[in-house]
Image (spheres, rainbow, N blue to C red):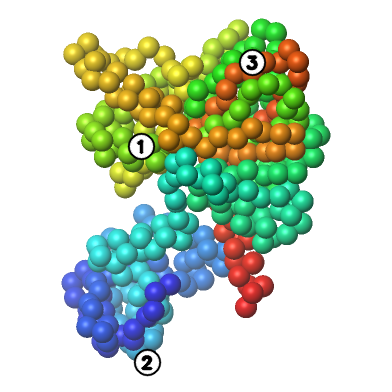
């Protein structure tokens, strides 16, 4: 909520109510927009959900009359309905409709949950939490989740090396996302693995399950045994790599954010496929996802004239992802866990030798919206306890 200035006067014009603020700013509000957002209990339920159908409002609705009360409230009697709306000046201020006001609100929204891009320097200050602490303290949980939101990655230590604990961690902030791998899955060397993760081979940094739509937005891996030689973990901030790729070659960025590629997982029981771009953009044109998994990507469907340029872009991205300057590296010991935003941070591991020791991880998926919701609620709670 921004600081609000009192209203000096209101003026009815055809189509709009015009508010003149005491600081000289002038805001226009289309009548249809005001009627649609009337705060009266017949228009909006106390739970915040709208009761009226927007389609039923007369599109040409206008004010029969309007009145400014004490510079702090605006009352409107409507012409096509027997209804009165009362708006606070604060609400009107918070909903000013100039392009600048809308852009300012978006900036404020983004600053609320800041995203920090990182490279190998994050090795010096790994975002780490303690399981004992986050399971009993709202403050500790809040700060661990805030790290996940900020860096797309966080480590958790002292998670008892017991089966199923990875799901218990998810239950602290959200819901397990079940897939064909189960509610959780064992990451260890198996006979006839349906995924190379279940071998001792190294895995270059990747996002999981890009063949799924929707792709799980969080992945957790919990280490129960770690006596094998090798199997070091690596995580890479895809958003940082993409930002650097865009600066290096806007053309490569354009190709990777507009060319559809297909990812697929296929065996006797499953056929899971998704076609999308490697770099995902949101409605504002900002990067909101990376989908990168060289194991499950299919032969590119790019026309013969443009294939060389697409390969150049793909190889450039892949080489950057494989560049140690972006690597955060660590060896997971039993009781360690890490979480990644699976549409932002890629994870991988070096090969290991399981002949003289064991390596056993359990993994699961969850979703980011639940985590962000929990973070938001905890922040409110922690702040209210401080005041
Ligand atoms: C996976 C995976 C990494 C590891 O299971 O998806 O990438 O460290 N595992 O075994
Ligand atoms: Zn993986």
* Within-10-Å neighbours for mark 2: few <14, some 14–19, many 20+: few
Residue 284: image x %, image y %?
31, 47
* Within-10-Å neighbours for mark 1: few <14, some 14–19, many 20+: many
Res. 196 image quadrant? top right
Tag 2–tag 3 contact (CB < 8 Å): no
Residue drawn where x is 62% and y is 52% of the image? 144
Residue 138: image x %, image y %?
69, 60
Residue 367 lies left or right of residue 229; in this view the side is left
Per the image, the residue denoted by label 1 is 242
In the foreground, 311 or 123: 123
* Within-10-Å neighbours for mark 3: few <14, some 14–19, many 20+: many
The label nearer to you, 2 versus 1, is 1
Q: Secondary structure at mark 2?
A: loop
Which badge, 2 or 1, is on the more N-terminal residue? 2
Task: Compute the Cα span from label 3 to label 1.
Answer: 29 Å
In this view, 25 is above or below 284: below
As drawn, the label of residue 70 is: 2
Q: Is residue 239 in sight in this rendering? A: yes
Residue 35: image x %, image y %?
36, 68
Which badge, 3 or 1, is on the more N-terminal residue? 3
Instruction: Specify the quadrant that holds the N terminus.
Output: bottom left
Q: Secondary structure at mark 3?
A: loop
């Amino acid at each position: 909520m921004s600081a609000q200035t009192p209203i000096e006067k209101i003026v009815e014009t055809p189509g709009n109510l015009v508010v003149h603020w005491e600081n000289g700013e002038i805001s226009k509000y289309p009548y249809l927009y005001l009627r649609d957002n009337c705060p009266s209990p017949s228009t909006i339920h106390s739970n915040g959900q709208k009761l009226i159908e927007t389609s039923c409002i007369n599109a040409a609705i206008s004010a029969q009359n309007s009145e400014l009360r004490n510079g702090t409230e605006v009352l409107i009697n409507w012409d096509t309905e027997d209804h009165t709306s009362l708006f606070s000046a604060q609400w009107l201020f918070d909903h000013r409709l100039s392009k600048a006001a809308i852009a300012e609100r978006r900036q404020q929204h983004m600053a609320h949950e800041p995203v920090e891009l990182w490279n190998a320097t994050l090795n010096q200050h790994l975002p780490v939490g303690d399981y004992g602490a986050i399971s009993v303290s709202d403050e500790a949980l809040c700060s661990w989740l805030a790290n996940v939101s900020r860096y797309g990655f966080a480590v958790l230590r002292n998670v008892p090396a017991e089966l199923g604990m990875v799901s218990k961690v998810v239950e602290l902030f959200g819901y397990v996302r079940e897939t064909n791998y189960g509610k959780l899955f064992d990451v260890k060397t198996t006979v006839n693995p349906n995924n190379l993760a279940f071998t001792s081979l190294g895995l270059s940094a990747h996002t999981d399950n890009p063949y799924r739509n929707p792709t799980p937005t969080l992945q957790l891996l919990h280490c129960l045994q770690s006596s094998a030689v090798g199997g070091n973990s690596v995580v890479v901030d895809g958003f940082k790599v993409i930002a650097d790729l865009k600066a290096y070659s806007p053309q490569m960025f354009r190709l990777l954010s507009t060319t559809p590629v297909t990812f697929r997982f296929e065996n006797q029981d499953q056929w899971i496929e998704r076609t999308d771009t490697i770099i995902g953009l949101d409605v504002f044109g900002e990067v909101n996802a990376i989908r990168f998994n060289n194991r499950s990507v299919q032969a590119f469907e790019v026309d013969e004239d443009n294939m060389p340029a697409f390969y150049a872009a793909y190889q450039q991205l892949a080489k950057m992802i494989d560049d140690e300057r972006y690597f955060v590296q660590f060896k997971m010991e039993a009781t360690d866990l890490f979480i990644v935003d699976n549409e932002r941070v890629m994870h991988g591991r070096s090969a290991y030798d399981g002949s003289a020791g064991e390596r056993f991880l359990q993994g699961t998926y969850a979703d980011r919206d639940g985590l962000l919701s929990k973070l938001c609620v905890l922040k409110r709670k922690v702040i209210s306890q401080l005041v």
